[in-house]
């Protein structure tokens, strides 16, 4: 009888030891801690011309993306690494009012051009600083906002009173 109890206890102890060793030696699944970055590519949705007010001459022609709903107007050019010189984003709002943009999560330095309901430039915020959350307000009510690469408004000599024309695809 003693032998039987000894075997039973020995078998139980061995089972516990085997279970403990197999659980403690179990490999944990590897988790990839690297963050995957998403690349957002430009989607041509229209063509825009910037025109000199005094002569009606074309200063520049751009391919544009259009932001005209809540999601696209809130996101804008955030998370983009670059933008070609002949590209821009046109924001179209349902009404004309004072607007203010900021550069949160925007990695590209921009010129932000505010335009009235009749598509005339009312103010320009030049050479904005990437990732900066400082408010960049319009100087007058605006219905449209055009974002282009920083410095282009100076190269094209854009001024208040100049205007845009655009068409969608």
Image: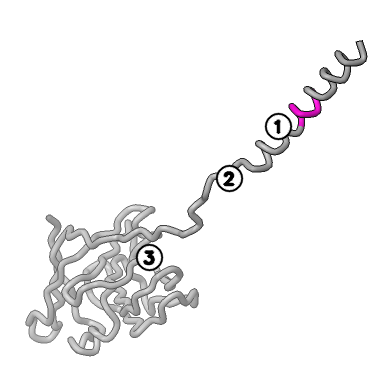
Left or right for 160, reference 72: left
- Name the residue tied to disc 3: 79
Crowd class of label 1 (few under 14; some 14 to 19; many from 20; radius 10 Å): few
Query: Which callout, 2 or 3, points to the residue nearer the camera?
Result: 2
Q: Which mark is residue 145?
A: none
Circle 2: element type? loop
The answer to which of 54 and 145 lies nearer the viewer is 145
Looking at the image, residue 125 lies above or below residue 13: below
Quote the CA–CA distance across marks 1 and 3.
50 Å
Say which residue appears at 35% left-offset and 81% top-offset.
Answer: 125
2 or 3: tag closer to the N-terminus: 2
Q: Position of residue 75 (x, y in %)?
A: 38, 60
Q: Is residue 135 left or right of residue 19?
A: left
Residue 42 in the image: state x and y as whole percent.
23, 62
The numbered mark at residue 19 is: 1
Q: Nearer the viewer, mark 1 or mark 2?
A: 1
Magenta range is 12-16
Q: Where the N terminus falls, by quadrant?
A: top right
- Residue for point 13% across, 65% down: 47
Q: Are marks 1 and 2 in contact (CB under 8 Å)?
A: no
Determine which residue is flagged by label 2: 28
Q: Specify the farthest residue to the front.
A: 3
x and y, in percent, of residue 140 in the image: 36, 76
Q: Residues within 10 Å of mark 2 (few under 14, many from 20)?
A: few
Q: Disc 1 on helix, strand or loop?
A: helix
Which quadrant is the C terminus positioned in?
bottom left
| Residue farthest toward the top in the current orientation of the protein | 1
């Amino acid at each position: 009888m003693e032998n039987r109890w000894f075997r039973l206890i020995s078998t139980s102890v061995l089972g516990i030891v085997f279970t403990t060793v197999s659980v403690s030696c179990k490999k944990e699944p590897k988790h990839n801690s690297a963050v995957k970055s998403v690349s957002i590519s430009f989607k041509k949705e229209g063509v825009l011309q910037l025109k000199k007010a005094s002569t009606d001459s074309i200063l520049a022609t751009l391919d544009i993306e259009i932001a005209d709903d809540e999601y696209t107007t809130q996101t804008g050019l955030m998370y983009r690494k670059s933008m070609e010189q002949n590209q821009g984003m046109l924001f179209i709002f349902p009404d004309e009012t004072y607007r203010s943009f900021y550069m949160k999560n925007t990695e590209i330095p921009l010129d932000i051009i505010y335009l009235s309901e009749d598509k005339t430039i009312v103010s320009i915020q030049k050479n904005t600083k990437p990732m900066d959350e400082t408010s960049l307000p319009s100087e007058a009510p605006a219905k449209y906002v055009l974002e282009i690469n920083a410095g282009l408004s100076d190269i094209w000599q854009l001024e208040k009173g100049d205007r845009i024309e655009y068409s969608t695809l």
